[in-house]
Image: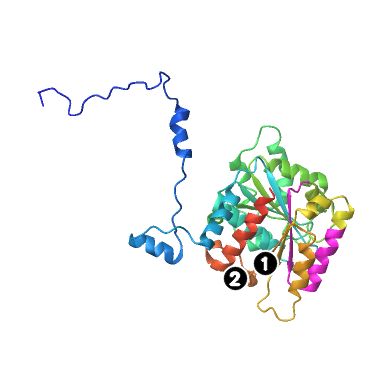
Amino acid sequence: MQPGQAAYPEQVWTPASGTPPTAEDFARRRQVRPVDPVATMGVRAVVNRIGLVRLAPGRQEQEMRRDIEMVRRNFGGLRQVTVVNPKGGAGKTVAILLLAMTFGQKRGGYVLAWDNNETQGTLGMRAQQDFHSRTVRDMLRDLAQFQGPHGRVGDLSQYVRSQGEGMFDVLASDESATGGEMLTAAAFAEIREVVSRFYKLIFVDTGNNVRAQNWQAAMDATDQLVVTMSARNDSAETAARMLDHLEQSGRQRLVRQAVTVVSMPPSRKEIDLPAIQEHFAARTRAVLLAPYERLIDTGEPIRYGQLSSATRDAWLKIAASVAEGL
């Protein structure tokens, strides 16, 4: 090599067709063949780590990946999921929290769980506590600061409760048993208009009075309905009568596209699960079972990381079914 000569010869580009390639041509090469999937779970993942062969994901992992992809897909705008059953103890609040947690974990932020109970709700009690204890009543009182272009996400943090590792926020209902007047349909609309500026996905917990204005307003704004119940005849019958009410009020499509979630007790003795599944499978889009979880049964605040893998997997499957309807 002569002094001053480059270590590598200069590359000279010679056009093959006379038309230079574009950035789109460069990007398109990635679309020709997707990367082969590699197992990251179970025995197949262990074999892959050894490095002798490269095994593809098994059926369970493939299903999980599809569920995660469904949860992560672009919904094309704000979406509201409303969880309903007029009977207390039907699992509405737990469903709200676990759906919001699952979407928050697998999808990221911009997820809100809103307790639209007409009286004292329990969503704020089952959620993680924050630096404040303000509720929807406080936000309603201070809505003027969000009028027009005013109001930032930092201002909203004074009213919603961050759930940390859950990757979502909670807007609690009035936690006083002697609270003020019932929320009106107009109040629901005003609050929804504000929170819709900051969140892409809103999960709405409902009360037990289907005639309440805020309950009806939540139905009118719903994109996906989730019907919850415990695996008991009384809980299922209350839900079935509520579906009758929705159909009679012209919301047949909302009912047909609904997802039904049946929460299982510690023991399956003396429950007529096949009859419940058959009835709601004939009326709603999907019926899914949520396994019993001792942590949920304690009534304490719920942390995603403390849930069993069976519960997390089941609620991922439920979340994917919900996402399919969005």
Residue 225 part of the magenta-drawn span: yes
Instruction: Name the residue type under label 2.
Output: Leu
Q: Nearer the viewer, residue 38 or 169?
A: 38
Evaluate whether residue 63 shows in this view: yes
Q: Is residue 216 left or right of residue 198?
A: right
Element at label 2: helix
Evaluate whether residue 211 shows in this view: no
Query: Badge 2 local density, few (<14 within 10 Å), some, or many (20+)?
Result: some
Asked if the residues shown at circle 2 and circle 1 are in contact, with their CB atoms under 8 angstroms apart, the answer is no
Write down the residue under mark 1. 289
Q: Position of residue 315 (x, y in %)?
A: 62, 61
Q: Position of residue 228 (x, y in %)?
A: 73, 63
Scheme of image coloration: rainbow
Quarter of the image that includes the N terminus: top left
Residue 242 part of the magenta-drawn span: yes
N-terminal-most mark, 2 or 1? 1
Element at label 1: strand
- Quarter-wise, where is residue 235 in the image? bottom right
Write down the residue under mark 2. 295
For this orientation, the residue located farthest to the front is: 17
Q: Nearer the viewer, residue 146 or 220?
A: 220
Instruction: Name the residue type under label 1.
Output: Leu
Q: Is residue 65 placed above or below 280 in the rendered structure? A: above
Q: What residue lies at 43% left-to-right and 20% top-to-bottom?
A: 19
User: Depth-wise, is mark 2 or mark 1 nearer the camera?
Assistant: 1
CA separation in Å, label 2 and label 1? 17 Å
Q: Position of residue 102 (x, y in %)?
A: 59, 57
Query: Badge 1 local density, few (<14 within 10 Å), some, or many (20+)?
Result: some
Q: What residue lies at 38% left-to-right and 60% top-to-bottom?
A: 48
Q: What residue lies at 74% left-to-right and 66% top-to-bottom?
A: 229
Q: Which residues are magenta?
A: 221-244
Q: Is residue 309 placed above or below 164 in the rendered structure? A: below
